Image (cartoon, grey):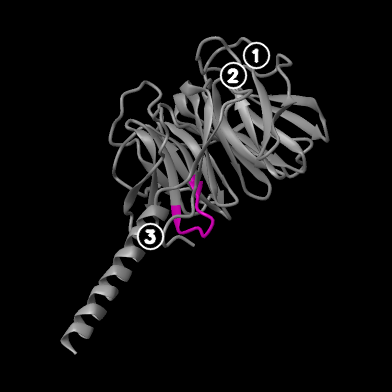
Amino acid sequence: MKIERLYGAIMFMAFVAFVMVSCKKTEKPSVAVIEDGIRFCESTLPYGDGVLIANFGTDELNPLNGEGKGYIVLWKEGEGVRTVVPADGNLSAPKGMFERDNYLYVCDVNKVAVYNLNGDSCSFVRAIAFPEGNLFVNDLAATDTVLYASVTNTDKIFKIDISDVSNPGEAVEWLSLPGPNGLSVSGNEMFVASYPADGNTRDVHVIYRIPDVNAPVPEKVISASGQYDGIVLSEDKSSLYVSNWTPAGVSKINLATGEITPVSVDVETPLVGPADMSLSGGKIYIPDLPNSRVVVIDATGCGDK
């Protein structure tokens, strides 16, 4: 009887160990890397059954260049990339993107460029100019009728009327916030990643929440400062994924507890500049700007929904 009990206990412990090891393995996301057709990619955006990737296309990395070499490709799993917005001279350092009804809005230096994507072709619609000095137009997020655009170097967020997405309004100053970079909107709630444009991280460079964009009052989600860039809400809306340049990496923030958990990105060459990432189909698309690649990880870890 004692031997049988001992054997049973050993088998139970072995089962528990197996479950723990299996769970631990699933916490380490699988990784893929997109490099073909990429040149200094700052932003990704889910589109149809693929992902749009914005590229500077320049010989040297300069987020404020005016060379007009910027372009956008569409990547599809199993098909690779194809160009959807060629280097037509209207884009120089394309960053955050927003799409609705096949109208693509793209952040660029001192402006937001608007394109109409129509099947295999695209046409340039117009450029929405920003006031002088607002150079680092960085990311876009929208409610039903308003598009918000962050400008990192002037600590401002602008709004644009998109009640008619084919005929947008002008950029109007909306809110001041330290180094607004990545934006994410869910309903009337906004999340903002703060990045120091001068490279000097201070205690104000954190993740912010604006509970109601109709009465904007920013509040800190976390107190840990950083050079935050990309920000995306998890599919179950319980967490935020944020990218940070110092140290370079991606973290998950539990919105209920404020707990910050590093996300494993197991690539041979470590991330250097994780920028404006996106989430689609359980995968996170992380543009590693200086390395001219998009790193794709599985967001579904052990215990995740």
Task: Report the residue at 71% width, 14% height from top.
Answer: 89
Where is residue 212 drawn, in percent x and y? 51, 53
Q: Nearer the viewer, residue 125 or 61?
A: 61
Q: Nearer the viewer, residue 126 or 216?
A: 126
- Name the mark on residue 56: 2
Tell me whether the residue at label 1 lies in contact with that at label 3, contact meaning CB atoms closer than 8 angstroms: no
Check disc 3 and report its element: helix, strand or loop.
helix
Task: Report the residue at 57% width, 26% height from top.
Answer: 35
Is residue 180 visible in the rendered image? The answer is yes
Give the magenta-colored segment's residue range.
Answer: 232-239
Q: Is residue 236 magenta?
A: yes
- Name the mark on residue 23: 3
Tell me whether the residue at label 2 lies in contact with that at label 1, contact meaning CB atoms closer than 8 angstroms: yes
Q: CA distance from mark 2 to mark 1?
A: 6 Å
Is residue 161 visible in the rendered image? The answer is no
Task: Report the residue at 58% width, 22% height from top.
Answer: 131
Q: CA distance from mark 1 to mark 3?
A: 45 Å
Q: Main secondary structure of the magenta part?
A: loop
The amino acid type, in three-letter code, at marker 3 is: Cys
Determine which residue is flagged by label 1: 69
Where is residue 304 drawn, in percent x and y? 45, 60
| Drawn side of residue 265 relative to residue 12, left or right | right
Check disc 1 and report its element: helix, strand or loop.
loop
Task: Locate the N terminus and report the quarter of the image it occupies.
Answer: bottom left
The amino acid type, in three-letter code, at marker 2 is: Phe
Task: Choose the circle earlier in sequence order: 2 or 1.
Answer: 2
Picture quadrant where residue 278 is located: top right
Q: CA distance from mark 2 to mark 3?
A: 40 Å
